[in-house]
Image: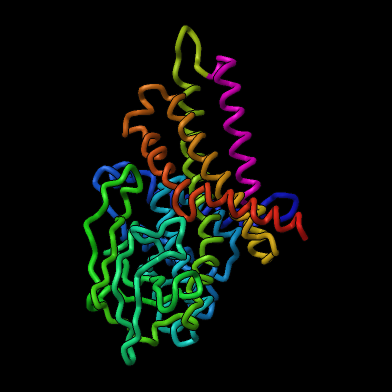
């Protein structure tokens, strides 16, 4: 990225993702939402385009791209459907975690099928009593010979019941982050079951269910890394996840903003077009400024994560908070500019507003983002 411009390869990737979103996702997104339909067939079509293992190494089928490339892709896909794009980002994080932290045997066994989307992946950290305080998770894995026996429950798991493999954070040791390990859990694991699909405000195109472990037996060979390293893996995954969800917010907001620009150029009131009223001109200018500012921050954070700078986590947190808040605000303003029509499902704006609201909660709430930012600032001030 030079002088804040995307290079030719990135522009080509962006155009490919935008075309896919416009052709394959946008025409169906409202109906998917209404039917609570999980479009697995469409999701799998991103694999031949290299979007199922974006930042996974090429030797196991990945595209070998960076975090900025991923942000560009998820932002573009979100112009078609933010919640579908967000699920594709979760799948990518699953593939990356095994590629990054798994053994060579695990990489070769699991990652190629994830990159081809022969298998869909999901990530399992949150529990009924452990959300922001993720290190308080209770799902227990006790070793019994060459298996771990799992008991507990995961909550708010995207893709649960539909994915083929899950990365599950479990407690193998004492309380706190050092007692947490990461296991690769196949869908057909004995003792694993799923709760009903949650009734949600948005994100209706992807299933969200509890995962229930009742003496579920998982081979010890499915342990990623060593016991006690799981929390470290989880936090590393969240840096990228925060960029991805911020990108999805910007993509959804851009779709709503573009629709609003078209609408106010066509709609007339009091004898002139809406975009001839100075108050509305000021509003769209403010929306554009906020979108571009958030996008620039997100892209810079992605570059820092690619470069593994010491402050990358803080920048990812700043980008996630700003992009998700700006994305929701811009989408809400776009709905307002549509008046009563914005409240109707057929215009697609109210779905964007509902989908984007949860982005300020998941991948770490925006309150937690501010804690991460302030702690880094205080640490730097004291050094």
Location of residue 41 in the rendering, given as x and y in whole percent from the top left corner: 31, 60
Is residue 294 one of those drawn in magenta? yes
Camera-side residue of 72 and 50: 72
- Vertical relation: 218 (above or below) 78: below
Location of residue 372 in the rendering, given as x and y in whole percent from the top left corner: 60, 55
Q: Is residue 305 visible?
A: yes
Q: Is residue 167 visible?
A: no
Residue 156 sits in quarter: bottom left
**322 on left or right of 172:** right
- Vertical relation: 294 (above or below) 112: above
**299 on left or right of 83:** right
Location of residue 361 in the rendering, given as x and y in whole percent from the top left corner: 45, 48
| Magenta region, main secondary structure | helix
Camera-side residue of 47 and 110: 110
Name the residue at the top extreme. 271
Residues in magenta, as a range = 275-298
Camera-side residue of 85 and 19: 85
**11 on left or right of 25:** right
Q: Residue at x 53, y 51 (%)?
A: 368
Location of residue 322 in the rendering, given as x and y in whole percent from the top left corner: 58, 44
Name the residue at the front extreme. 175
């Amino acid at each position: 990225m030079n002088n804040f411009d995307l290079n030719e390869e990135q522009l080509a990737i962006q155009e490919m993702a935008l075309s896919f979103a416009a052709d394959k996702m946008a025409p169906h997104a409202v109906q998917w939402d209404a039917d609570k339909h999980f479009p697995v067939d469409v999701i799998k079509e991103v694999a031949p385009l290299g979007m199922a293992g974006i930042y996974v190494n090429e030797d196991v089928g990945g595209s070998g791209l960076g975090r900025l490339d991923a942000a560009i892709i998820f932002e573009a896909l979100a112009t078609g459907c933010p919640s579908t794009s967000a699920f594709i980002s979760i799948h990518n994080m699953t593939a990356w975690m095994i590629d990054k932290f798994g053994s060579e045997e695990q990489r070769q066994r699991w990652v190629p099928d994830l990159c081809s989307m022969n298998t869909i992946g999901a990530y399992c950290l949150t529990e009924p009593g452990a959300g922001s305080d993720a290190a308080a998770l209770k799902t227990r894995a006790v070793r019994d010979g060459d298996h771990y026996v799992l008991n507990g429950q995961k909550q708010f798991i995207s893709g649960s019941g539909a994915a083929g493999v899950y990365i599950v954070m479990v407690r193998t040791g004492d309380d706190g982050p050092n007692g947490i390990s990461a296991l690769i859990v196949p869908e057909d694991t004995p003792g694993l079951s799923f709760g009903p699909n949650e009734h949600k405000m948005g994100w209706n195109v992807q299933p969200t269910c509890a995962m229930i472990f009742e003496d579920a037996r998982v081979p010890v060979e499915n342990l990623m890394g060593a016991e006690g390293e799981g929390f470290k893996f989880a936090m590393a995954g969240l840096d990228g996840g925060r960029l991805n969800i911020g990108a999805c917010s910007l993509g959804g907001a851009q779709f709503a903003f573009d629709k609003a620009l078209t609408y106010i150029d066509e709609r007339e009131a009091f004898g002139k077009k809406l975009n001839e009223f100075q108050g509305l001109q000021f509003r769209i200018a403010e929306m554009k400024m906020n979108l571009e500012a958030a996008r620039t921050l997100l892209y810079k954070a992605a570059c820092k994560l690619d470069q593994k700078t010491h402050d990358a986590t803080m920048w990812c947190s700043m980008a996630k908070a700003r992009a998700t808040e700006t994305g929701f605000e811009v989408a809400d303003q776009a709905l307002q500019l549509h008046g009563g029509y914005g409240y109707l499902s057929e215009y697609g704006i109210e779905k964007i507003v509902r989908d984007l609201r949860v982005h300020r909660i998941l991948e770490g709430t925006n309150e937690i983002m501010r804690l991460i930012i302030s702690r880094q600032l205080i640490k730097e001030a004291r050094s």
